[in-house]
Amino acid sequence: MKLLKIAAAAATGLALLAGTAQADDKPVVGLIMKSLANEFFQNMMAGAQAHEEKRGDYKLLAVGMQNETDFESQINAVENFITQGVDAIVVAPADSRAMVRPLKKAMEAGIVVVNFDVALDAEAKKQQNIELAFVGPDNRGGAKLAGDALGKKLGAGGKVVIIEGNPGADNANERRLGFEDSVAEFELELLDSRTAHWETEEANTVFSNMLTAHPDIQGVMAANDSMAIGVVKALESAGRDDIIVVGFDNIPAVSPMISDGRMLATVDQFGTDMAANSIDLALEVVKGGPQLEGWVKTPIELVVAN
Amino acid sequence: MAAASLAIMPQTTESPAFLSVQGLKKHFGGVKALDGVSFSLLKGEVHALVGENGAGKSTLIKILSGVFPYDSGSISLAGEEYRPANPHVAKELGVQVVHQEFNLLDHLSIAENISVERMPTTRLGLLDRQEMNRRARLALDAVGLTDVDVKAPVSSLGIAHRQLVEISRALQSKSRILILDEPTATLTERETRRLFDIIESIRADGVTIVFVSHHLEEVFAICDRVTVFRNGISIGTDRISETTPDGVVRKMVGRQLAATANEADPKRTPGEVALRLDAICTQANPKDKGVSFDLRYGEIVGIAGLVGAGRTEILRGIFGVDPLRSGRILQAGTEIRFAGPRDAIAAGIGFVTEDRKDEGLILDMPIAANMSLANMRAISRTGLLQFSEENRRTREGGARLKLKYGKISDAVSSLSGGNQQKVVLAKWLGRNPKVLLLDEPTRGVDVGAKAEIYAILKDLARDGVALLVVSSEMPELMTLADRILVLAEHEIQGELTRPEFSEENILKLAYGQVRQAGGQTQ
Amino acid sequence: MTTQVLSETMPNATRFSVRTALQNAGIGLALLALILFFSVFTEHFLTPNNITNILTQITINLVLAVGMTFVILIGGIDLSVGSVMAFAAVVAGKAITLPGFGPAEAIALAVVAATLTGVACGMINGVISAYWALPSFIITLGMLNIARGAALQVSEAQTIYSFPYAFEEFGSAMIYGVPVVFLVALLLVLVAWFVLNFTVFGRLLYGIGNNEEAVRLAGHSVYWYKVAAFTICGFTAGIAAIVYMARLNISSPIAGIGFELNAIAAVIIGGTSLSGGRGSVIGTLLGAFIIGVLANGLILIGLSDFMRQMITGVVIIVAVVLDHYRAKYASK
């Protein structure tokens, strides 16, 4: 089922690049996402496509990217959408600064732009002199939810480490800051903080080594669940069941770990619905609703064992 | 181009030495490469350096051209101490070398190659192509390549022309001493004669020429004096007019050479037809008329011809290296088709290629590994190497060919040219081939090893092996072959039997001056 | 030149014994120096647990590097191993989670699926680059993308999880503190060493790396030997996939990004020449250790991520420069 959808999306993408998307009387929404190799966006895309079918009153053009840092192709996609004269662009920017200029062009062309998932940089928006609302979860707040869960369990003086996402990525930064907020609030002791590039095997290696250097670690905050899995496996290999792990994203693979206590908590930001919700908001504006303002926060939820 | 003309006739004027080498020594680790070399060069003379491979000529050249420093002794150039720190300094001082292995950049144009050391620039600092091409034109004209386009890539040139381009490049910069290392190794007789003309004109301009060669006839044809090397020592310098080839060879080998060179062998009686070539057309052959001849067991057939006559292509075609365009090869009356060398080898054929370094040997691998390369089955059982068997066979093969080496595990690159060639031979002899194809079997091989290789090949023929030898050295073919096929433009121009052998006869056919009646043999 | 006439005092070794030994000794010394350094400057480096960790952590890279050694020895390169590993892991992950199999059958199925996937990808690399004599750099770059795309396609970009317990057991099993997966890698090294040094196949791979034409003219089918080298490299990527799955108990389609570069680094640090024909799999083993020890030690020492990356880069360059001199010295 999903395979077909990916194929369909790829076909849409191609059609779009060729610039042959035909006009319809339905409003056209261009959806720009990040790497479709990432489960999170894969699910989000599936959600958006299901949403298009369900509503049936708009046409969806979706594009993804090769990898997380490939913002070049996002800029191209924006330009193509402008040429095609779509009604709205819903975008999860790969770079919070680089995307501001092309999106400004789109707005000047009269296209409704909704920024979701990662907020565009406030400073850059000011420089380009644009007002653009952000629809999305509070990554920092979400990370703090997970961090707080850990903090409550450990109490003041608990020794923790952070496994970060890609250095330089905005959501990685936000999540690290959220964890650090928890560290400050619960007076935890932060022993070390390192990147594992969102990846399981690297997290496994990096965390094993951190554990050797700091055998007294009590808690681990991983910036996504893939890395949390690597941490859990490292703990199993080391025979340690006294260290508490929290993650982020709530991917299916961690639900057994949360049920059996190998992980304390993760955070669900309802990625599947996020694009669909943003499209709803964009269509409101297209139909003449009021402009969006500020930060439209989407729900986040701490996931723990029942 | 060259310095002002100083008409010195070295044969008559004993001028003071221009370059003088005294007691030169050079060691590599424990190996004495040079162990006391003394000789001198006069201005405007052609001076030959001869000696077997490994006698120290190459090391001396590398010292003179600034590649290696020397350990002790002294060199003076035009009265001043000469101790070049690197090749660039040597060039600045006017000492140029044309190496045996070419240093040309294949994909660049001839003009770019000629100017590569000092590219002409415009006022803006950009490459001045016109000037570069103009200089190249002059340089090529000077070596007689008037019909070659300077913009053509070097890769489009034949090996002989590359040699001349290399020489013209050396002559670009002001040369006081021009060292030619085996310049004729890849040239045909005609090209060699042209080179000699060029050498004469350079010498007339006052340049001293050092001529390194294994070919004594050339030394005696062009040189004024000759210095003989043996085992890192200079044995002595003679005026050419006062010595004989025999005398030089005696000095080189330090013993009387068994007089085999041109002496006729006891008659061999050819046996059955080993291979019958029926109108073979190779890919390089532009015409449709192929080559036909028989090769019999127990005979040595020579193939003569100029470079580009299609000699090598025939051998490669027989061996299945390059597919044939048309024609048939028959073995014992039935047609055989080789999809590749593998099939040819299975049919009992061996192929000693022209290019030892690129096609014949794996230079960085041990002698033993090279010798067993074509015969892996003999030294392995179910895919596993049997080292004791390999070592035994290697020692046997080495002893059979009087190979001189340190250890059988030494890399082949540590051997002299003659010994390397023996390894190539040993590789094929290990299979006891019924037919052996040889392309320039003694290129870059010293006199002593040459005689040994000839003896080996003759023994093989006596034992019933069919040998097909391609060579640019006519004396070699006349020594070895029972009959010589002369090739020009991919066609057999004629066949010579022993009584008809002479350089003149071969050349006449090779240049297409005469065409033997019924030249095709069947 | 000292050439002596045939004497009876010749050693049996007909391989590159002296040169290789010298080379490995050099790399071994560098490794020893690193170990010494980290032992002195960190507290936990030489503890049994940390040694176990290092062995676990180098396993995947070592397995990939063994296959890579074959390809580099013939003068090729395989950029696709990281992606092929992910593809093999995903295919095996799908196989192992098929309903209706007992744990033993599921594991066997997964192992077969992973190795077959790896072998197939490697063989395609080899056949295409050898048949058309194309640079393997570009062919395997293509395969890098194909395999990654295939991994994402097959897995629908989802992490595959919940493997049989026995599989997980294998991934974390130890014998006297030595991870079983590392022993598997070591076994691969030994087999590769044997093949390269004691078989006709190995001899000819060295030959092809040095002078392909000479090997061809000696009647050997260079084509098949090349295909075989790439196939072996694909096979080790399949084995690496199994190790990955057993160790982490998941199959991730984004696994192994950049692993090819680590494997190449291990091979080159280990003294194998990028132009082929020279090197040894023992060197590769040492090279993998150097990379692993460095990654581990620099974290223990508390260096930041960015400094760590820089130092790893510096070490790779220094190792290759040193190897240049070592090779020069050895050939004198």
Image: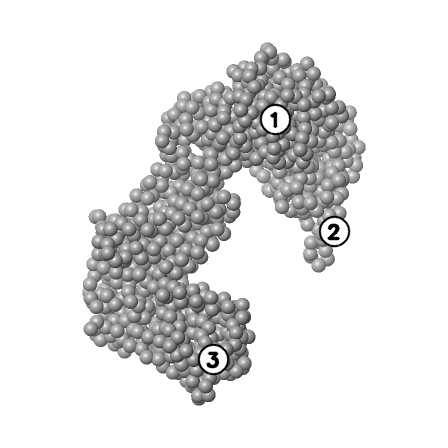
Q: Looking at the picture, how far across and down is residue B329, in whole percent?
A: 57, 27
Q: Are marks 1 and 3 on the same chain?
A: no
Task: Name the amino acid type tagged 1.
Answer: Asp
* Residue at image point 35% right, 73% down: A272
Would you identify the image quadrant in which residue A7 lies? bottom left
Closer to the camera in the image, A185 or B150: B150
Q: Which residue is mark 1?
A: B278
* Residue at image point 74% right, 27% down: B512
Return the chain for callout 1. Answer: B
Report the Cα–Cα distance between label 1 and label 3.
78 Å
Task: Name the amino acid type tagged 2.
Answer: Gln
Return the chain for callout 3. Answer: A
Q: Left or right: where does residue A41 sit relative to residue A160? A: right
Whichever of labels 1 and 2 marks the residue nearer the N terminus, that label is 2
Return the chain for callout 2. Answer: B
Single out the mark in the foreground, 1 or 2.
Answer: 1
Task: Name the amino acid type tagged 3.
Answer: Lys
Badge number at residue B130: 2
Would you identify the image quadrant in which residue B333 lies? top right
Q: Which residue is mark 3?
A: A26
Q: Looking at the picture, how far across and down is residue B382, in whole percent?
A: 36, 31
Q: Looking at the picture, how far across and down is residue B288, in whole percent?
A: 67, 33
Is disc 1 surrounded by few (<14), some (14 to 19) or many (20+) residues within 10 Å?
Answer: some
Closer to the camera in the image, C139 or B477: C139
Q: Are marks 3 and 2 in contact (CB under 8 Å)?
A: no
Q: Left or right: where does residue B224 sit relative to residue B431? A: right
Report the Cα–Cα distance between label 1 and label 2.
51 Å
Element under disc 3: loop
